[in-house]
């Protein structure tokens, strides 16, 4: 399965396939209804949806990862 990726900035939303992703405001993200605070340079894995989020400044990159990678983490 090829990787799906979207890059968002604060106050923007998008979709990875059927999964809703968004940056509500600077430092606060949502993936399929799960929310988290994220610091600059931090990377967070949402295990339920197999979505990894990395923040670089005001750009937030959401990437769908393989389920095998989630189980290995």
Image: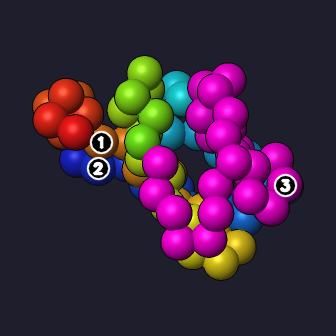
Q: Residue at x 46, y 34 (%)?
A: 46
| Residue 2 visible | yes
Q: Residue at x 75, y 49 (%)?
A: 28
- The reply to whether discs 1 and 2 touch (Cβ–Cβ < 8 Å) is yes
Compare residues 1 and 63 and report the one nearer the observer: 63
Q: Position of residue 30 (x, y in %)?
A: 68, 38
User: Would you place residue 56 above or below residue 63 in this image?
Assistant: below
Compare residues 9 and 40 and report the one nearer the observer: 40
Label 2 sits on residue: 3
Pair 3/1: label in front: 3
Q: Secondary structure at mark 3?
A: strand
Pair 3/2: label in front: 3
Main secondary-structure element of the magenta-colored stretch: strand
Label 1 sits on residue: 65
Does the segment drawn in magenta span residue 30?
Answer: yes
Q: Secondary structure at mark 2?
A: loop
Residue count near mark 3 (Cα–Cα under 10 Å), binned few <14, some 14–19, many ≥20:
few
Reading the chain from its start, which is encountered first: label 3 or label 1? Answer: 3
Compare residues 22 and 34 and report the one nearer the observer: 34
Q: Secondary structure at mark 1?
A: loop
Reading the chain from its start, which is encountered first: label 3 or label 2? Answer: 2
Q: CA distance from mark 3 to mark 2?
A: 25 Å
Q: Residue at x 22, y 39 (%)?
A: 73
Q: Viewed as shown, does residue 1 lie left or right of 64?
A: left
Name the mark on residue 25: 3
Q: Position of residue 35 (x, y in %)?
A: 68, 34
User: Would you place residue 18 above or below residue 26 in this image?
Assistant: above
User: Would you place residue 67 above or below residue 73 in this image?
Assistant: above
Q: Which residues are magenta?
A: 21-44
What is the image's colouring?
rainbow
Q: Position of residue 26 (x, y in %)?
A: 80, 61
């Amino acid at each position: 399965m090829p990787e799906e990726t979207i890059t968002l900035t604060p106050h923007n939303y998008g979709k990875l396939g059927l999964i809703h992703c968004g940056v509500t405001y600077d430092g606060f993200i949502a993936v399929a209804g799960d929310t988290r605070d994220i610091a600059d340079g931090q990377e967070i894995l949402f295990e339920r949806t197999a979505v990894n989020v990395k923040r670089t400044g005001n750009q937030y990159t959401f990437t769908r990862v393989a389920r095998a990678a989630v189980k290995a983490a």
